[in-house]
Image (spheres, rainbow, N blue to C red):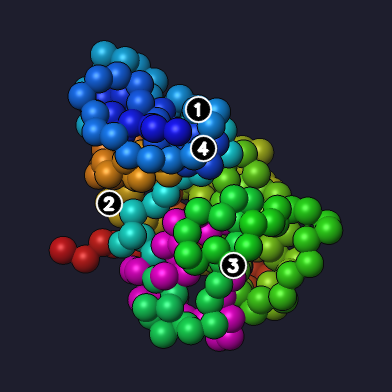
């Protein structure tokens, strides 16, 4: 069917991340994906650069590329690296660029060449190759479940991009304390993390309103975490 890519101020995306029109001023392209899901500014009259978007139905959000490349410059790994929610594949791509050739990804929906297969990471039936390390930007609603499963599977390290507020929130911080993270790297400047369809529409990621950090666990580590900053290079 003929779908349309709209102007940035109003975007529709189907459940697999394809773009369909919401208003005028567009050009025509071809896609074959039905069931559009609205990804429009949550406050219609708000400035575009505020980047407040309706929540993606599968919690698919994309971090800026520098977040991943800087992470692999700062954190060392041994063995394979697996991303169970790889999305556009930015973590896998950054890992390979850093010299970790045994890096691969999976996701609930295959959205890029970096996704080896479409599979639910939390499914008990999903058979997978046992990775040495798991690095991931998990779906927000299932972040805790992803951490729990990843720590059971990974033989060396688990690294997750999670909201910095996990440190201060009472319930999450108490749970987090019991998991004994080894390091927390606060991402600065604050990254923008829009829904995937926004990136596919060609919009630039900017105006982030939530603070994030890389949380890192090492198998068999018990103790207090260390804190640092992961800064974007100037």
Secondary structure found at label 1? strand
- Residue designated by label 3: 116
Mark 4, residue position:
33
Q: Residue 145, percent across and down? A: 70, 49
Labels 2 and 3 touching (C-beta < 8 A): no
Residue 137 location, x and y as percent?
A: 51, 54
Horizontal side of 200 relative to 215 (left or right) equals left
Position of the C terminus by quadrant: bottom left
**Tag on residue 37?**
1
Q: Mark 3 or mark 4, which is nearer the start of the sequence?
A: 4
Query: Mark 2 to mark 4: distance in Å?
Result: 36 Å
Mark 1 crowdedness (10 Å alpha carbons): few <14, some 14-19, many ≥20: many
Q: Secondary structure at mark 2?
A: loop
Quarter of the image for residue 128 reads bottom right
Q: Residue furthest front?
A: 1
Frontmost residue, 71 versus 39: 39
């Amino acid at each position: 069917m003929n779908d349309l890519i709209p102007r940035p101020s109003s975007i529709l995306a189907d459940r697999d991340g394809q773009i369909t029109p919401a208003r005028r001023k567009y050009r025509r392209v071809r896609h074959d994906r039905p069931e559009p899901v609205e990804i429009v500014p949550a406050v219609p009259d708000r400035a575009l650069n505020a980047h407040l978007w309706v929540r993606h139905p599968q919690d698919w959000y994309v971090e800026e590329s520098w977040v991943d490349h800087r992470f692999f410059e700062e954190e060392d790994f041994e063995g394979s690296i697996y991303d169970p929610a790889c999305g556009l594949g930015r973590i896998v791509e950054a890992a390979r660029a850093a010299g970790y050739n045994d890096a691969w990804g999976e996701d609930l929906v295959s959205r890029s060449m970096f996704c080896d297969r479409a599979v639910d990471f939390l499914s008990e039936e999903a058979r997978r190759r046992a990775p040495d390390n798991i690095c991931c930007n998990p779906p927000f609603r299932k972040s805790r479940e992803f951490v729990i499963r990843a720590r059971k599977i990974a033989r060396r390290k688990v690294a997750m991009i999670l909201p910095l507020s996990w440190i201060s929130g009472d319930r999450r911080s108490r749970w987090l304390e019991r998991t004994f993270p080894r390091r927390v790297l606060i991402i600065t400047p604050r990254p923008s993390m829009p829904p995937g369809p926004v990136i596919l529409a060609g919009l630039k990621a900017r105006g982030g309103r939530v603070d994030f950090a890389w949380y890192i666990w090492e198998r068999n580590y018990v103790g207090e975490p260390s804190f640092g900053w992961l800064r974007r290079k100037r």
